[in-house]
Image (cartoon, rainbow, N blue to C red):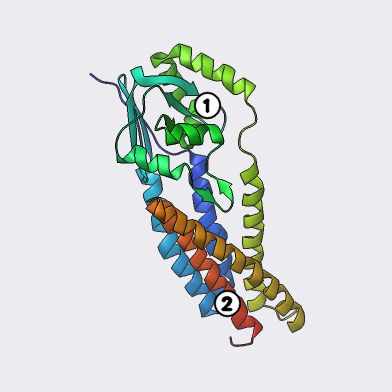
Amino acid sequence: METRHVYGVSPWRRRLLYGIWALFAVPLTVGGLVSGEAALLTTAAIFTAIALPIFVWALRTARLTVTPDRIELRQAGGTLETSWSNVEQIRLVRGAEGFVLREPMQGRGADRFATTSQVVIRGAPLYDPYRRQLLAERRFIPIEAFSYWLTHGDLRQVLSARAPDLVRQGDLTAADERRARKGSTGRILLVSAIVLAAGSAGVLAATHSDVGPVVTRVVLSAVALAVAVLAVRNALSAVSLFRSRQYGSALLWCAVAVLQVLLVLACLAEITGSR
């Protein structure tokens, strides 16, 4: 009887996605409830209705399946699969884990991943040059979304049982390549800070009895400008993802852009006194 090992997305990634939703929705909801401002509650409801189903769908779709004969990666963007005999290397570099293959994969999933490998989101590529090349050649199955189970589950043992030499070589390579992706961290922190500022400003605008109108308008103007710039960049990213047929990711960035536009409109309404 064939033994199948199926792994879902890392709990940390799940928390990150739901945290992104909370980062937008919670400040708006609290501000709307405290102030009675319907616009804030409407914005939170619209974002939740758009983003939350996308998050749930993406998390439920993503699966890594390992059998004695094959490896299968299923994500919203498509399915990648190959036989163990086609695995040339197991890459265990943190944040860049995956299977390097001898021969290219066939099918729509491989084609979509090859296209997506060249996509740039907000000025940063999704993958490093090495993985971009392998994905373009259809010779890489990325599993960083499931790497949590290498240390908190039995994924390492399962891989070692199938290909012990490749796992040992992967550990040696990982030890020599401690420099995984770091550039995206700064961007994430910047976006998070701006979003938090936007949410706080929304609450401040709704309950600013102790804050002078001039100060409030200056703060809201700065937030509106920053969020408007982010909305434009997110919209362009969504267009790029739509063209590469990554519809789930494209819808996600569309949802973020929509929320940001609504935040800008709410700020402008407060600035002009049209509440």
Residue 135 position, x and y percent, is 44, 35
Callout 2 secondary element: helix
Name the residue at 40% across, 46% down.
59
**Which disc is residue 72 wearing?**
none
Callout 1 secondary element: helix
Between marks 1 and 2 in the image, the one whose residue lies nearer the viewer: 2
Marks 1 & 2, CB-CB < 8 Å contact: no
Residue for badge 1 = 151
Query: Which image quadrant for residue 68?
Result: top left
Does 77 sit above or below residue 167?
below
Residue 73 position, x and y percent, is 37, 34
The amino acid beneath tag 2 is: Ala
Name the residue at 44% across, 26% down.
99
Classify mark 1: residues with Cα within 10 Å, few (<14), some (14-19) or many (20+): few
Q: Is residue 214 left or right of residue 124?
A: right
Query: Which image quadrant for residue 202?
Result: bottom right
Quarter of the picture holding the N terminus: top left
Q: Earlier in the sequence, mark 1 or mark 2?
A: 1
Residue for badge 2 = 266
The amino acid beneath tag 1 is: Thr
- Name the foreground residue: 44 vs 63: 63
Q: What distance separates the C-alpha of mark 1 from that of mark 2?
A: 45 Å
